[in-house]
Amino acid sequence: MLEAAVKGYFVALSLILAIGAQNAFVLRQGLRREHVGAVVAVCALSDALLIGAGVAGFGSLSTAVPWFGEAMRWLGVAFLAVYGALRFRAAARGGEALRPSEAGAASLSSVLWTCLLLTWANPHVYLDTVVLIGSISAQHAPHQGVFGVAAACASLSFFAALGFGARVLAPVFARPAAWVWLEVGVGVTMWAIAAGLAFGG
């Protein structure tokens, strides 16, 4: 059970760390100190719902279709390998400094709508939470639920740290080099998880 919890937490954390529009938006709101709590809540709750659907649905489907779990395991390996390579490519291109907008404060409704769009309209979020986390959780039967709860906790802790800790990170992430090193770290983590799935399954 403890292994499932630890794996669930760090698998989810490594996936969420991948730089994307949602993370950039959360960080930007944190830098502006604007509706941060609401943004963190929307992101964390959305992830929890998707992770729950992935863990529950994947387990049921794997039971009904025995070969599905193995197929999804190798799909996960391929996805992580490609995603890791994309992170290395982004690092090679030099990163991109994130600077908060100088515009006036946005309304809560507009911020929440933007957050929901960046979360639910992103196809990667379904691959990460429903397919990938769902497939990895099946490797930890009968503790898939523990795996899923830990993964949801990783999402909450990451978005809270990103949003509320942005004031501390602001000077760091104003430099492109910081994004380069983060991209490299995410790429290494993705490939490590892919190797674990490929050779440990």
Image (cartoon, helix red, strand yellow):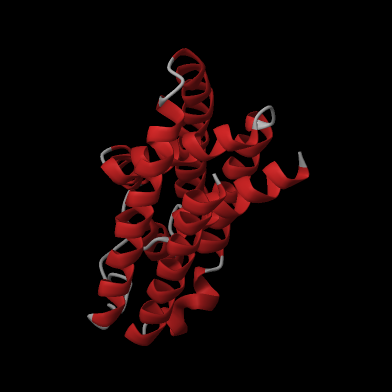
Rendering quarter of residue 65: top left
| Position of residue 168 in the picture relative to residue 128 (left or right) | right
Residue 74: image x %, image y %? 38, 43
152 over 68 or under it: above or below = below
Q: Residue at x 63, y 38 (%)?
A: 147
Nearest the camera: 40 or 63? 63
| Position of residue 97 in the picture relative to residue 72 (left or right) | left
Nearest the camera: 131 or 41? 131
Q: Residue at x 38, y 72 (%)?
A: 183
| Position of residue 93 in the picture relative to residue 172 (left or right) | left
Nearest the camera: 57 or 156? 57
Q: How many marks?
A: 0
State the quadrant of the C terminus. Answer: top right
4 over 36 or under it: above or below = above
Q: Residue at x 46, y 20 (%)?
A: 66
Residue 194: image x %, image y %? 45, 55
Q: Residue at x 39, y 45 (%)?
A: 76
State the quadrant of the N terminus. Answer: top right
List the single residue furthest toward the top: 64
Rendering quarter of residue 172: bottom left
Residue 130: image x %, image y %? 42, 34
187 over 78 or under it: above or below = below
3 over 144 or under it: above or below = below
List the single residue furthest toward the right: 2
Q: Is residue 122 visible?
A: no
Q: Is residue 44 visible?
A: yes
